[in-house]
Amino acid sequence: MSTTVTEPPSAAGPPAVEVEGITKRFPGVIANQDVTFAVTRGTVHAIVGENGAGKSTLMKMLYGVQRPDEGTIRINGETVSLHSPADAIKHGIGMVFQHFMLADNLTVAENVVLGAEKLHGIGAAARAEITRISDEYGLDIDPRDLVADLGVGARQRVEILKVLYRGARTIILDEPTAVLVPQEVEELFGNLRELKREGITVLFISHKLDEVLSVADRVTVIRRGTTVDTVLPQDVTARQLAELMVGTELPTPETEESTVTDRVVLSVDGVTLAGAGRNVLEDVTLDIRAGEVVGIAGVEGNGQAELVEVLMGMREPAAGRIALEGTDISDWDVRRIREAGVGYIPEDRHRQGLLLDAPLWENRMLGHQTQQPASRRGLLTQAAARADTERIVREYDVRTPGIDVTVGSLSGGNQQKLIIGREMSHAPKVLIASHPTRGVDVGAQAAIWDLIREARREGLAVLLISADLEELIGLSDTIRVILRGRITGEFDPDVVTSQELGSAMTGAGKDAS
């Protein structure tokens, strides 16, 4: 299929951003090779591709974090050399990262002006400018609000406001919908349409192909470091885009026939966790049976992370009981829970799951240092750990030059497959999977879905926490909604819709137990 498009001759002026022949090499790998595309001013231009395809490296070059070895970057027709993010901002390019960079204890205005105090000071003039930008672009942000009191969607709008405040006319959005519920996604897309009307250009990086097709004016596909095609959304389907990206059809997370048994593996009964001023978990009760996937849906910050911390022994509940196959583990530490058969895929693989500067084989041992093959008779055995890392690389299709490279050099999807291979290698009774496909491409996502389905068939009990509602509906046998630390609804994934889940997650819907 070839549906390459060129910039329309009627476009006013030169492209907002144009890259030609961009190549970037690192030791042992070519991240980008001869990448070429142009972005029309005042449009949303999506960039899609597998993890490791070179999207992040390309965006870092456009934002001045890295420099290309070959090729040309033009902004509004002018050839530029970007040595830092400050250079990018001077040329009108801003970037909103997937993980927000906001200080919760500061107001919106204080966050926005931080580092840009010379523009409008730090007082009334700055607040007036923030209000003007918010009104002009329909962001609905009050500069006096405390960031800690804002929801995820509002925080993202603050990040967009930050780059607009600094004069950006082209905004790079990195996975902007990853943490949003459906209603917030629609609000974001409304904001993007308003930005377009005001002449702002948006580079939209995403793995969610249906969203890409609904919001983008053009889509550039990158595969293995080079541009494959630039297409019009109306000319392709999500499946065709996936084929351009990975050579296969777009996968779906649908499960097969029920494998749920009567045997309760993990039981959570009335668990309450005290927080600062209020309980962050309140009377949480649920059972997970062998062969069952229990999904947890909720807007981030409503107790999901704390529930995981309690189940993994990082925090002890103030009340309630947690039982693993009938044994009370409420006061066990992390090591004992791990050794008892609880696997863990953390929400933040960089902070909680990996040592980025350590080689793959050392990361294979992480969290399992007291178990074979890493440990025998209390001694670490490097040779056995290396051999088992080689097995995981083969069986879980971890794409790497070797097991001695640092895990930080791998793409996100391959880092995640290494973690899953590590956890599944110890035959867990329960798997706590927190956002297992966050930030991975459709190919790695399909592989992870397959691994969860296979583990379910073999009798594993799975607690699945995800912001991807399609994933939750497709993989779960039952879905619980968590809101302000309480389980507020139980839903049948065979009949519930994403909109209904989204409403329940924000407190607008009715329980459907």
Image (spheres, helix red, strand yellow):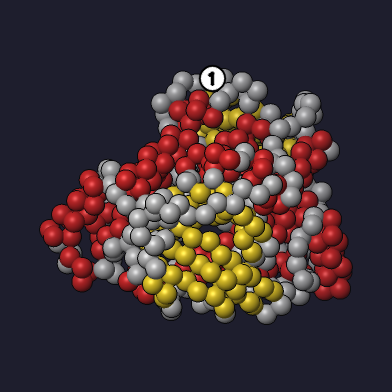
Asked whether 132 or 80 is in front, the reply is 80
Q: Position of residue 133 (x, y in %)?
A: 24, 52
- Which residue is drawn at the image coordinates 48% and 35% (left, top)? 182
- Which residue is drawn at the image coordinates 80% and 55% (left, top)? 396
Q: Is residue 410 visible?
A: yes
User: Would you say 430 lies left or right of 230 here?
Assistant: right
Q: Where is residue 23 in the image (x, y as percent from the top left)?
A: 60, 73
User: Would you say 447 lies left or right of 219 here?
Assistant: right
- Which residue is drawn at the image coordinates 73% and 59% (left, top)? 418
Asked whether 472 or 47 is in front, the reply is 47
Q: Which residue, as the protein is rendered here, is positioned at the far front?
A: 9
Total number of numbered labels? 1
Q: Is residue 314 visible?
A: no
Q: Position of residue 269 (x, y in %)?
A: 60, 32
Quadrant where the image shows the C terminus: top right
Instruction: Please tell me whether residue 247 is drawn above or below residue 414 in the rendered image.
Output: above
Which three-letter amino acid code belongs to the residue tagged 1? Ala
- Which residue is drawn at the image coordinates 26% and 68% (left, top)? 116
Q: Where is residue 131 in the image (x, y as percent from the top left)?
A: 20, 50
User: Would you say 499 lies left or right of 277 here?
Assistant: right
Residue hosting label 1: 512
> Please, what secondary structure does the residue beneath circle 1 have?
loop
Q: How crowded is mark 1: few (under 14 residues within 10 Å), some or many (20 or more)?
A: some
User: Would you say 16 lies left or right of 130 here?
Assistant: right
